[in-house]
Image (cartoon, rainbow, N blue to C red):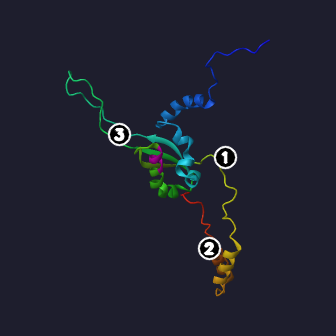
Amino acid sequence: MSAPSRAKGLRARPLADYVLRELDPLVAARGFGEASLLLCWREIVGARIARICAPDALKWPVRAKAKPIDASTPKRRDKTPREPATLVLRVDPGFGLEAQHFAPIIIDRVNAHLGWRCVARIALRQEALAPAPASQRQASTRPPPADAAARARAVEATEGVAEAGLRAALIRLGEQALSGSTGAPGDA
């Protein structure tokens, strides 16, 4: 017996098409025009910021309804530019001040991602975030070990320091400064 024939042009659709269609009303209820801000948050703002906060909602200002000039004039669509929204962020408890300092960076990156001045302000709501998936967690927060040449130069530079604790701290600082391992660039 032969395999059942399929109609010409009928193909399986990716699951993402169905998921996004179901997500749209949920995302719109939170004030977002598209799901990309939620789905790509880590890529938009960077790993450091994404660890401490996540978008919750976009609060749009209320617009006044335009009244027609007289009954014979048809209603015209208001051509005034829309006021930017307030992005409400959920912030891990204890990181509110840090998120507040990152606010201008977050606003710039979100607006650059969306392609227009969508967000003007940020409101913070302290609430525990879900733990990051294992694929996004870093194995260690320690910097990579410095090379031997940088360590030797740091030890040589701190020979005159008598206190052992201070000398060890200066050697670690010197190793990092001389080897150039100050962290990932652009991960603010």
| Marker disc for residue 82 | 3
Pointer 3 or 2: first along the chain: 3
Q: Which mark is residue 133?
A: 1
Q: Position of residue 101 (x, y in %)?
A: 48, 58
- Residue farthest along the top direction in this orientation: 1
| Inter-mark Cα distance, 1 to 2 | 34 Å
- Residue 90 visible from this viewpoint: yes
Residue 171: give x, y in percent of width and height.
Answer: 66, 77
Residue shown at 62%/75% (left/top)? Answer: 174
The mark lying in front, picked from 3 and 2, is 2
Q: From the viewer's perspective, is residue 171 above or below residue 61?
A: below
- Residue placed most toward the observer, 45 or 165: 45
Identity, as a three-letter code, of the amino acid under mark 3: Arg
Residue located 30% across and 30% down the image:
77
Determine which residue is flagged by label 2: 178
Helix, strand or loop under label 2: helix
Magenta stretch? 109-113
Residue 11 to residue 120: above or below: above
The residue carrying pointer 2 sits among few (fewer than 14), some (14 to 19) or many (20 or more) residues within 10 Å by Cα, namely some
Residue 165 can be seen in this image = no
Taking depth in this image into account, of 52 and 45 the one nearest to the observer is 45
